[in-house]
Image: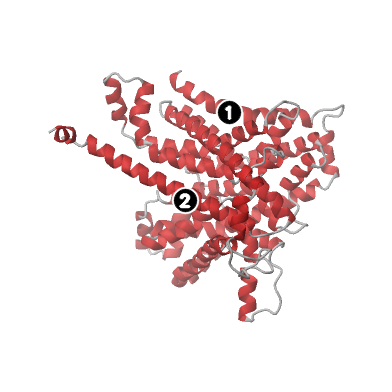
């Protein structure tokens, strides 16, 4: 019973934020004299058109991430040195920037006065600016770049474990490199790629910021309809029915992923039909034809994507120093007026302090709750530990807008303070990253250290605080950082719980962006980014000093030498 006491807080928080709103949404969607009225209304309205458009959008984004992310993950495994570092930075940088800043940066890239049009006009390729932003292709391109880290990181972690001797064996048997890659390497990665596909598809299914900011008016997606149904139309039963439909889609995707995992673990081969065999032969001939130019086919798109990813984030710096009234690149002049406006604006200052308060509290809660559950899960049986790990990953597969909308409808008639709702939801959303990072780090610690501490009379709590926690400082800091970033830039929760007195910074900027597209968000992103970077560097230096000082005193003979 001991380990479960440390896991109960995480299970209770997940039950309150996820399970309870789902049960109430089911009840609310079936309320009334006709229990199926809300679902019949979905068939009679434009919901099916919006649902089909949302699924097509998610599929296109997922397909783009598969086509670009698979070779990028493979390149991360093969490359070494500074090239690998640049590629990793280009993948991780958008993730740390946040969804609002990433989408805003794409406005500066694709807008009529943006980077792409400026370059094309300067080179004389076009005579007038192209319509790139506020189009469906532009939305898909921006969404792929925004979602790419979600695909690459899990795929890369699985590809790192592949034994390359199998590819060498295939080469020795006469297979060319491309054929060996498609027939040996890629099938072995089907579970990792399927997991990445599921994560990207489910995230795109509930994406809100990028479609609203960059999409055309015709690209009206399900997340937008859910927000309008709650905040504008005041239709809780209709919104509950839409939440249930989206949860059913999520459940079907997870069942498909579980089926793929079962097939992969049992190593069963399904019988291929004649069409699959013919398609495989055509694909094999195509692979042999492109084998001589395989490195160019890999290097060119990766280089272009890396350059575009870095530019779309680094463009924030000149935009923050723009002296113009509206968003344009290159800026008409350089000035610090927007940074000064952010620093002296009382509304933005209050919003910044409020965001820091709720996100720091949520990150601390996620680190403590997730860390305690991660350490306790290692003491459970394999089946129980897998069950706890699966439960901890629920926030990764449920879009945050569904979580916020469900909890808002569940607490509609309850006196719940917005600040408490923000902290609870952000804590729940940050739990998976903290749990997985801390658990993976704790699993590599020698268990004999804990046994030695126990043999010297330390209890479980004392052993955890004096032995495990000092060794887990890097993992705890990483989990805390991820949990903080996941909440600081979130818009979905603010759509339902923000008030005039309790409005986070991201929501304040979102309201101003919808009125006019100015360089102010770039100035805020630059100041906040510099502050966060300074804090990370200070924490890293302090940790290294603490570790070196600690290792000095723990070195054999150090205490005796000091006494002498």
Hey, which quadrant is residue 330 in on the image? bottom right
Hey, which quadrant is residue 142 in on the image? bottom right
Residue 47 vs residue 303, the one in the foreground: 303
Q: CA distance from mark 1 to mark 2?
A: 31 Å
Q: Residue furthest front?
A: 344
Q: Residue 89, relative to residue 397: is it above or below? A: below
Give coordinates of residue 346: x percent, y percent.
65, 46
Give coordinates of residue 191: x percent, y percent.
50, 46
Q: Is residue 136 left or right of residue 450?
A: right
Asked whether residue 143 is in view, the answer is no
The circle drawn on residue 13 is 1
The crowding category of the residue bearing disc 2, from other C-alpha atoms within 10 Å (few below 14, some 14 to 19, many at least 20), is few
The crowding category of the residue bearing disc 1, from other C-alpha atoms within 10 Å (few below 14, some 14 to 19, many at least 20), is some
Hey, which quadrant is residue 471 in on the image? top left
Residue 2 vs residue 114, the one in the foreground: 114
- In the picture, which quadrant includes the C terminus? top left
Residue 100 vs residue 17, the one in the foreground: 100
Describe the element under mark 1 as helix, strand or loop: helix
1 or 2: mark nearer the eye: 2
Q: If you read the primary sequence from the N terminus, does the residue marked by circle 1 or circle 2 appear first? A: 1
Residue 74 vs residue 184, the one in the foreground: 74
Q: Residue 221, relative to residue 231: is it above or below? A: below
Q: Which residue is mark 2?
A: 533
Residue at x 64%, y 29% (from the top left corner)? 19
Q: Residue 554, relative to residue 490: is it above or below? A: above
Q: How is the image coloured?
A: secondary structure
Q: Residue 85, relative to residue 363: is it above or below? A: below
Give coordinates of residue 40: x percent, y percent.
84, 38
């Amino acid at each position: 019973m001991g380990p479960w006491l440390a896991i109960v807080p995480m299970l209770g928080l997940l039950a309150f934020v996820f399970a309870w709103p789902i049960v109430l949404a089911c009840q609310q969607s079936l309320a009334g004299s006709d229990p199926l009225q809300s679902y019949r209304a979905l068939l009679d309205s434009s919901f099916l058109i919006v649902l089909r458009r949302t699924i097509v959008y998610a599929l296109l984004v997922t397909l783009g991430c598969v086509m670009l992310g698979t070779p990028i993950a493979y390149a991360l495994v093969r490359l070494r040195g500074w090239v690998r570092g640049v590629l990793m930075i280009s993948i991780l940088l958008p993730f740390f920037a946040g969804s609002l800043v990433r989408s805003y940066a794409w406005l500066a890239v694709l807008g009529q006065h943006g980077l792409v049009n400026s370059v094309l006009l300067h080179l004389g390729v076009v005579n007038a600016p192209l319509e790139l932003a506020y189009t469906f292709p532009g939305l898909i391109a921006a969404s792929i770049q925004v979602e790419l880290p979600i695909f690459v990181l899990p795929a890369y972690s699985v590809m790192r474990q592949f034994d390359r001797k199998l590819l060498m064996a295939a080469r020795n048997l006469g297979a060319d490199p491309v054929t060996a890659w498609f027939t040996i390497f890629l099938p072995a990665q089907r579970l990792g790629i399927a997991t990445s596909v599921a994560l990207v598809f489910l995230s795109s299914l509930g994406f809100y910021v990028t479609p609203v900011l960059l999409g055309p008016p015709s690209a009206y997606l399900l997340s937008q309809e859910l927000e309008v149904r709650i905040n504008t139309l005041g239709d809780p039963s209709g919104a509950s029915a839409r939440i249930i439909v989206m949860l059913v889609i999520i459940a079907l995707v997870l069942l498909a992923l579980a089926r793929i995992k079962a097939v992969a673990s049992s190593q069963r081969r399904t019988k291929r039909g004649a069409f699959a065999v013919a398609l495989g032969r055509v694909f094999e001939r195509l692979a042999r034809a492109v084998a001589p130019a395989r490195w160019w086919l890999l290097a060119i798109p990766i280089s272009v994507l890396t350059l575009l990813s870095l530019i779309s984030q680094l463009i924030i710096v000149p935009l923050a120093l723009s002296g113009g009234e509206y968003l344009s690149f290159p800026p008409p002049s350089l000035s610090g007026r927007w940074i000064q406006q952010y620093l002296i604006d009382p509304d933005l200052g209050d919003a910044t302090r409020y965001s820091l308060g709720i996100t720091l509290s949520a990150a601390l809660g996620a680190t403590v709750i997730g860390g305690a559950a991660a350490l306790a899960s290692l003491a459970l049986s394999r089946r129980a530990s897998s069950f706890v790990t699966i439960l901890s990953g629920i926030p990764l597969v449920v879009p945050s807008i569904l979580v916020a909308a469900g909890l808002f409808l569940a607490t509609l008639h309850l006196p719940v303070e917005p600040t408490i709702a923000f902290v609870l939801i952000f804590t729940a959303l940050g739990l998976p990253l903290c749990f997985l990072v801390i658990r993976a780090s704790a699993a590599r610690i020698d268990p004999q250290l804990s046994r030695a501490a126990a043999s010297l009379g330390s209890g479980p709590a004392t052993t955890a605080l004096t032995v495990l926690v000092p060794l887990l400082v890097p993992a705890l800091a990483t989990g805390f950082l991820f949990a903080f970033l996941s909440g600081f830039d979130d818009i979905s929760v603010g759509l339902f719980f923000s008030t005039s007195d309790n409005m986070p910074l991201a929501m304040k900027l979102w309201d101003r962006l919808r009125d006019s597209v100015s360089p102010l968000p770039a100035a805020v992103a630059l100041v906040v980014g510099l502050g966060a970077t300074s804090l990370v560097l200070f924490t890293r230096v302090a940790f290294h000093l603490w570790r070196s000082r600690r290792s000095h005193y723990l070195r054999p003979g150090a205490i005796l030498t000091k006494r002498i």
